[in-house]
Image (cartoon, grey):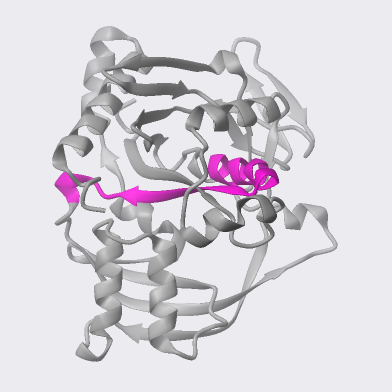
Amino acid sequence: NMARTETLTAYRCKFSYMQRNNPIIDECREDIKSGKDPEFTFSDFMAMYTENTNDVLIGKNSDRAIGLTNDRISTNKSNGINFWYISPLVGKQGQPMTVFKRSTGKKYDFGADATALYNYHLFIYEDNCEIIAIFHRQNSSGCKSVFLETANNILKTKGIKLEMNLIIPLSDKEKNITPVKITLQCLRNDSSTDAADNIKKKKTVIHDMGLNLEVIDNSPIAAIIKNMQLGKVSKEAAFAQIKELQGNSEDFNDAELKLKIGKRTRSVSWNDFENIVGIHDITEELHSAYTKSKNFVAELTMLSNKYYHDIIESGVINDK
């Protein structure tokens, strides 16, 4: 279906110690002080993750569920690079749904305790402890948020967290996307007595502060956002730097960006910024290859491998 957009989004991953609420703080106190990362490989992580996902894991913040069993993971090693192809089942959870079976014309209703799960695709490359994760997305749908949230829910029992920093597509670094305004927000998560309302937590803006990024007074903030856009700093670090520059912004916990994209303008939440600047579009290549081979996963894997090698050959990893 050529109407469907196919993209890849790449992240540089690392395991680090939790700085707060670390259940093994006494065992790793010296390593934390010295900035040493835990001796923990992606293989170690996958052993923990698959052990827990024999049952479907629920992401409270991402509003999704994920299931991953060992039969949905394949691994190999080539030229010293450890490779994982992971195909989790992911879908919306906590909402009533109706399934229509076209062959019979019958409809089947399910309550809010049911979850509709679909195939997703994730590729992991590990070379000398350098881990790159490449997530496939169809249109706006992907599995990154629920994967990261559920992974960290499991890892926190070991006092470890998984961090992911966006890698900006090399050919898109000069993409004509210009942030023109940032609005720092203090948000409050509202609770409801209706369980259905809490499936996706409502947020209320208590107060906000808008900053025009097109004036010289706010050029330091514009520079921070530009560095995030180029992949030189994570969105978490960028947000912390912006708050530090503002001085009186400790209570701000989110933001909205107004972007100029070509001749259009669009407002996106801080967390959605990477979905605008971080995608590598493979729609044409993937659909063209699939038309010939009829093997979607094989063609997608080849394009992911190509993207990974382009990232490595560019030296962008060494620049970090």
In depth, the one of 219 and 109 nearer the eye is 219
- How many numbered marks, from 0 up? 0
Vertical position of residue 79 compared to residue 89: above or below: above
Q: Which of the 4 quarters of the picture holds residue 133?
A: top left
Residue 234: % across, % down: 37, 59
**Residue 100 spot, x, y in % from top left:** 64, 23
Quick one: 150 or 44, which is closer to the camera? 44
- Residue 19 makes an appearance in the image: yes
Please provide percent x and percent y for residue 57.
Answer: 69, 36
Compared with 311, 55 (above or below) is above
In the image, what residue occupies the spot 25% across and 91% down? Answer: 217
Position of 221 compared to 191: left or right? left
Image quadrant in which the N terminus is located? top left
Outermost residue on the right side: it is 193
Q: Is residue 209 above or below residue 205?
A: below
Magenta span contains residue 170: yes
Measured from the top left, where is residue 230 in percent x and y? Answer: 24, 58
Asked if residue 108 lies left or right of residue 300, the reply is right
Q: Is residue 174 above or below residue 7?
A: below
Residue sitting at 45 percent across and 86 percent down? 209
Does residue 189 appear to the left or right of 15 in the view shown?
A: right
For the point 59% across and 55% down, the residue is 18
Q: Is residue 161 magenta?
A: yes
What is the span of residues highlighted in magenta in the rendered image?
A: 146-172
